[in-house]
């Protein structure tokens, strides 16, 4: 058995990335809600934990057979490698998708807004999400990630203008919670991204792209909240005089 019901969700997905899509399919939050155990999350959602464990085990087995030796375990990487990966993969994805989706939403609202007034709320919620994420990425790239890289390579405990690295981390985690709340609102407003019968191809493309954005953000936040940030705080604690 790969999945242990008593594992915290963040640890579970860090060890078995394949679990992410299973949890997503059951609407179980493993990024901002990564401190709960799998059993606790299933109980709260009214889901059979044993069945979910079986799905995760099946997904893990299938992936291991298909991609033997090629999977990446981010908890085994250096903090710098993880920062680089997050910037190059998730940050660059958002920098491309956020403006593209803004234009696509405008197009769909113009074509279908009268018949589907909920689209105006989709537009509003997405605008709030973009306004939250773009400065968030900048703060990570210009402040937090450079500090983490220094922390990992410095011979002596570094001094940061913001004090402990835990301070900007707390701010980033708070902003992750806000982004997670907006994602839940978007999913509710769109009825789980269900395209109405009269929806055109642009409507379909929009909802598919929003759902893909949601999944990527869940992965992004998970890697930070459950792997990168705890690793940075642990590294800082070990480097301080008290930690030696």
Image: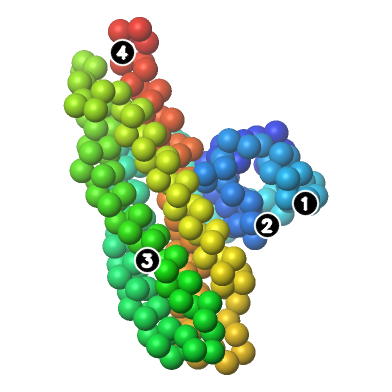
Kindly report the distance in space between the C-alpha atoms of the residues bearing marks 2 and 3: 26 Å
Mark closest to the chain's N terminus, 3 or 4: 3
Q: Compare marks 2 and 4 and give the one earlier in the sequence.
A: 2
Q: Quadrant of the N terminus?
A: top right
> Colour mode?
rainbow
* Residue that mark 2 sits on: 26
Residue 158 occupies which quadrant of the picture?
Answer: top left
Q: Which residue is mark 4?
A: 240
Q: Quadrant for residue 94, please give it.
A: bottom left
| Distance (Cα) linking label 2 and label 4 | 42 Å
Task: Give the Cα distance between marks 1 and 3.
Answer: 33 Å
The CA distance from mark 3 to mark 4 is 41 Å
The residue under the point 60% across, 85% down is 196
The residue that label 3 is drawn on is 127
Image quarter in which the C terminus is found = top left
Please rate how many residues cluster around mark 4, counting C-alpha atoms within 10 Å: few if below 14, some from 14 to 19, many from 20.
few
Residue 9 place in picture, x, y as percent: 60, 41
Residue linked to disc 1: 47
* Residue 174 image offset from top left, x and y in percent: 42, 41
């Amino acid at each position: 058995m790969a999945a242990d019901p008593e594992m915290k969700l963040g640890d579970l997905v860090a060890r078995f990335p394949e679990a992410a899509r299973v949890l997503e399919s059951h609407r179980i939050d493993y990024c901002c809600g990564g401190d709960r155990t799998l059993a606790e999350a299933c109980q709260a959602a009214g889901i059979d934990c044993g069945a979910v464990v079986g799905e995760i085990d099946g997904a893990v087995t299938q992936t291991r057979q298909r991609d033997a030796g090629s999977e990446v375990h981010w908890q085994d990487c250096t903090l710098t490698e993880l920062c680089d990966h997050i910037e190059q993969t998730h940050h660059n994805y958002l920098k491309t998708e956020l403006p593209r989706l803004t234009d696509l939403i405008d197009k769909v609202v113009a074509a279908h807004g009268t018949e589907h007034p909920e689209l105006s709320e989709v537009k509003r919620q997405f605008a709030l999400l973009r306004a939250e994420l773009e400065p968030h990425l900048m703060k990570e790239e210009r402040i937090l990630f450079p500090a983490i890289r220094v922390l990992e390579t410095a011979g002596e405990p570094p001094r940061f203008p913001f004090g402990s690295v835990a301070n900007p981390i707390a701010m980033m985690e708070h902003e992750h919670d806000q982004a997670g709340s907006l994602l839940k609102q978007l999913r509710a407003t769109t009825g789980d991204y269900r395209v109405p019968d009269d929806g055109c191809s642009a409507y379909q493309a929009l909802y598919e792209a929003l759902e893909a954005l949601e999944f990527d953000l869940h992965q992004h936040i998970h890697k930070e909240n459950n792997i990168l940030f705890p690793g940075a705080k642990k590294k800082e604690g070990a480097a301080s005089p008290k930690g030696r």
